[in-house]
């Protein structure tokens, strides 16, 4: 699946939840999908234009003067289903933390401990954010089961990172702090 098709899938998917302005769509992709999907903001507006030209979304006047709200058309829903049905293409991993730890003897244990501590803090922050999402959505009637699967995945990954970070910090605590020490 091409990068453009992946962007189209994210945009069509977000619009399948509810009609949105380009700005609201950008915010939804950042704030909601951003927990598991990264989309360049520079791709969203060109994608909307392309999807509109292909008849997959329709533009309607928004509440504010000059604003537009985009809705998913029936053809857009079919296109979304077709994109979602394609095989998943996994990207090779690129993890800057693990790359640095792999060469940790050059960096030194103290610097590696700082990196792992930062990763642990980030995972704890994500776990707290997921708890807040659960709390907010429970107050609004609960999490859609399909969306809940992605939320559960994020929680599991965050807990796994916390457990790994604790183990890594214990290992690093027994190593000399400076490179070559």
Image (cartoon, rainbow, N blue to C red):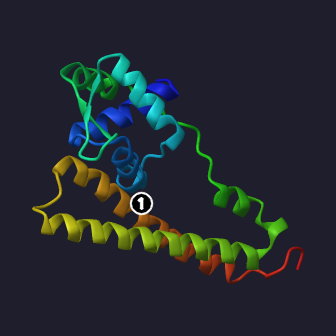
Q: Residue at x 37, y 18 (%)?
A: 53
Above or below, 20 against 83 in this view is below
Q: Quadrant of residue 16?
A: top left
- The residue lying toward the viewer, choosing from 142 and 165, is 142
Residue 62 rendering spot, x and y as whole percentages: 26, 41
Name the residue carrying label 1: 157
Under circle 1, the secondary element is helix
Residue positioned most to the right: 180
Specify whether residue 40 is in view.
Answer: no
- The residue lying toward the viewer, choosing from 7 and 102, is 7
Q: Quadrant of residue 54?
A: top left
Q: Is residue 13 left or right of residue 177?
A: left
Q: Residue at x 21, y 47 (%)?
A: 146
Q: Quadrant of residue 55?
A: top left
Specify whether residue 171 is in view.
Answer: yes
Residue positioned most to the top: 54
Above or below, 178 against 55 in this view is below
Residue 71 rendering spot, x and y as whole percentages: 24, 33
Residue 90 rendering spot, x and y as whole percentages: 49, 35
Above or below, 68 against 1 in this view is below
């Amino acid at each position: 699946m091409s990068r453009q098709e992946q962007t189209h899938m994210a945009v069509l998917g977000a619009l399948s939840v509810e009609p949105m302005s380009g700005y609201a769509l950008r915010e939804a992709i950042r704030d909601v999908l951003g927990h598991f999907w990264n989309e360049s903001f520079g791709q969203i507006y060109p994608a909307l234009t392309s999807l509109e030209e292909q008849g997959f979304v329709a533009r309607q006047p928004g509440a504010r003067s000059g604003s537009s709200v985009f809705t998913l058309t029936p053809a857009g829903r079919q296109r979304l289903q077709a994109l979602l049905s394609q095989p998943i293409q996994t990207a090779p991993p690129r993890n800057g933390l693990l790359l640095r730890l792999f060469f940790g003897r050059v960096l030194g244990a103290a610097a590696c401990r700082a990196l792992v501590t930062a990763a642990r803090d980030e995972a704890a922050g994500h776990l707290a954010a997921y708890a807040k999402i659960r709390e907010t959505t429970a107050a609004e009637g609960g999490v859609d089961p399909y969306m809940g699967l992605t939320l559960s995945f994020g929680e599991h990954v965050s807990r796994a990172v916390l457990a790994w970070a604790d183990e890594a910090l214990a290992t690093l605590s027994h190593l000399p702090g400076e490179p070559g020490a």
